[in-house]
Image (cartoon, rainbow, N blue to C red):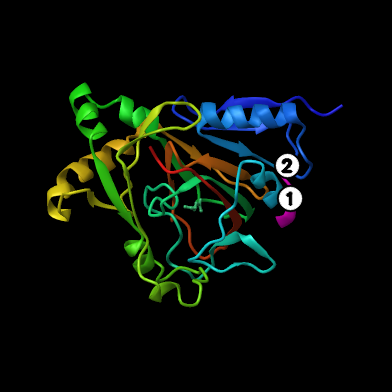
Amino acid sequence: MSDPIEINPISDACGAEISGVDLSKPLGNEKFAAVHQALLDHQVIFFRDQDLTPEQQVEFSRRFGELRISEQYESLEGYPEIIEIVKEPDSTGIVGNLWHSDESFLPQPALGSLLYILESPEVGGDTMFANQYLAYEALSPGMQEMLLGLNAVHSDASLQKRNAGRALRVKAGAEDRGVFEATHPVVRTHPETGRKSLFVHRPYTIRFENMTVEESAPLLSFLYAHSARPEFTCRFRWQEGSLAFWDNRCLQHYALNDYSGVRRYGHRVTVVGDTPR
Ligand code: SIN
């Protein structure tokens, strides 16, 4: 008989650690449903002490939907669905050290991302997550109503610039292909929970639709600061064998670049999402 599943929140805002699940084995329908529900309830779920091959990570991820093949980064050899998230001892930059939601510059941004860490610094390298349902719900009714009528333009132009200093392997030709751009509602409704969340992200959202960059900047700056208020967040301390699965439809995340001289290394898989509405 397998261990019972346990779900322990790590903050009131978001995030729960799940024990009693071995992701290297196919999950029965009941355990899978409990894991899926935990993701919807807590927005980001964490598993510790996992021993996963790339195939097993891909197999588990695939149960949540189609997987993205990155157009920006080289994949792990033999595994087109996996990109390597790496900071070498001599790298200065890392991936994800601005609050963001993955791939919001695409027409169908990521549903979720699954990061499995194989090498973790002794100190530092945590990841923070911020609940964007709470961010929306904490706004005044007047601001909520105004935002409900707005769309925003998202672009990966800044990502291309920020690749300098990172140990990532950018795909040949990726920098010549032009930028990805997509327009999405500023407040989106989660397709599974029906809840509304704020959907603007500092590195990718460049302006409101039908407005200039300059006109958009003051309100966007307010929303970026608001969306990362500490009371909406949780913080995860990685160990080797930890896997985090976050829901990009209602969450932003931020990887801390607060360590140097050591390696941090993981495998990330991205599940393709729907068109935000
Ligand atoms: C990311 O933004 O996907 C990177 C997260 C991390 O390295 O913790």
Residue type beneath disc 2: Leu
User: Do the CB atoms of the residues marked 2 and 1 lie less than 8 Å apart?
Assistant: yes
The residue that disc 2 covers is 23
The stretch in magenta equals 50-55
Q: Residue furthest right?
A: 1
- Residue 69 percent coordinates (x, y): 57, 60
The residue shown at (48%, 26%) is 193
The residue shown at (56%, 55%) is 68
- 272 vs 6: above or below: below
Which secondary structure type mostly characterizes the magenta part of the structure?
loop
- 19 vs 88: above or below: above
- Residue 23 percent coordinates (x, y): 73, 42
Q: Secondary structure at mark 1?
A: helix
**Is residue 62 visible to the viewer in this orientation of the structure?**
yes
**Is residue 53 visible to the viewer in this orientation of the structure?**
no
Q: Nearer the viewer, residue 102 or 153?
A: 153
- Residue 84 percent coordinates (x, y): 58, 62
The residue shown at (58%, 61%) is 83
Q: Which mark is residue 56?
A: 1
Q: Residues within 10 Å of mark 1 (few under 14, many from 20)?
A: some
Residue 54 in magenta stretch: yes
- 240 vs 46: above or below: below
